[in-house]
Image: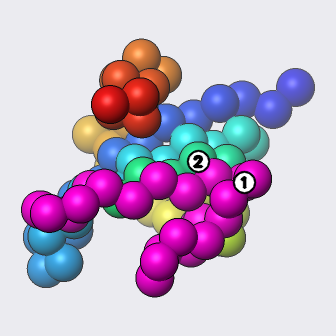
Amino acid sequence: MKKDIYVRRKWEEENIIIYLHFIGENAVRQMEVFPNKVVKISKNNPISEDSYLYDQNFSDIKWDESDFISEDEFNEKWNT
């Protein structure tokens, strides 16, 4: 069974926070939080404006321990 993984990473140079939900190696939901808007994309809607659902494997990124968040934290942000 593939595991659900939830991560959050801030890109200071872009002034954006990206939340990602992976199932196994594949991203299934993504939320990009900009200062003036929020963009939500998912496996069912993989493109919105200039944003595309992350299409690389989970293991392609070197994650920091602080990047990992709980399912509740992800869903709280996703549902607002």
Q: Residues within 10 Å of mark 2 (few under 14, many from 20)?
A: many
Q: Quadrant of residue 72?
A: top left
Q: Of the residues under marks 2 and 1, which one precedes in the sequence? A: 2
- At a point 46% along the width and 82% down the height, the residue shown is 50
- The answer to whether marks 2 and 1 mark residues whose Cβ atoms lie closer than 8 Å is yes
Q: Residue furthest right?
A: 1
- Along the line of sight, the residue nearer the viewer: 58 or 35: 35
Q: Is residue 27 something one can see in this rendering?
A: no
Asked whether residue 53 is drawn in magenta, I would say: yes
Mark 2 and mark 1: span between their CA atoms? 6 Å
- At a point 42% along the width and 35% down the height, the residue shown is 78
In the image, the segment drawn in magenta is 33-54
Residue type at mark 2 is Arg
- At a point 87% along the width and 26% down the height, the residue shown is 1
Position of residue 60 relative to residue 64, above or below, is below
Asked whether residue 20 is drawn in magenta, I would say: no
- Along the line of sight, the residue nearer the viewer: 24 or 45: 45
Please provide percent x and percent y for residue 65: 33, 40
- Along the line of sight, the residue nearer the viewer: 7 or 42: 42
Position of 47 with respect to 37 (left or right) is right
Q: Which residue is mark 2?
A: 29
Please provide percent x and percent y for residue 24: 74, 42
Query: Which quadrant of the figure contains the C terminus?
Result: top left
Q: Quadrant of residue 56?
A: bottom right
- Mark 2 residue element: strand
Position of 37 with respect to 26 (left or right) is left
Q: Residues within 10 Å of mark 1 (few under 14, many from 20)?
A: few
- Mark 1 residue element: loop
Q: Residue furthest top?
A: 72
User: In the drawing, what numbered circle is on residue 43?
Assistant: 1
Q: Is residue 67 something one can see in this rendering?
A: yes
Position of residue 36 relative to residue 66, above or below, is below
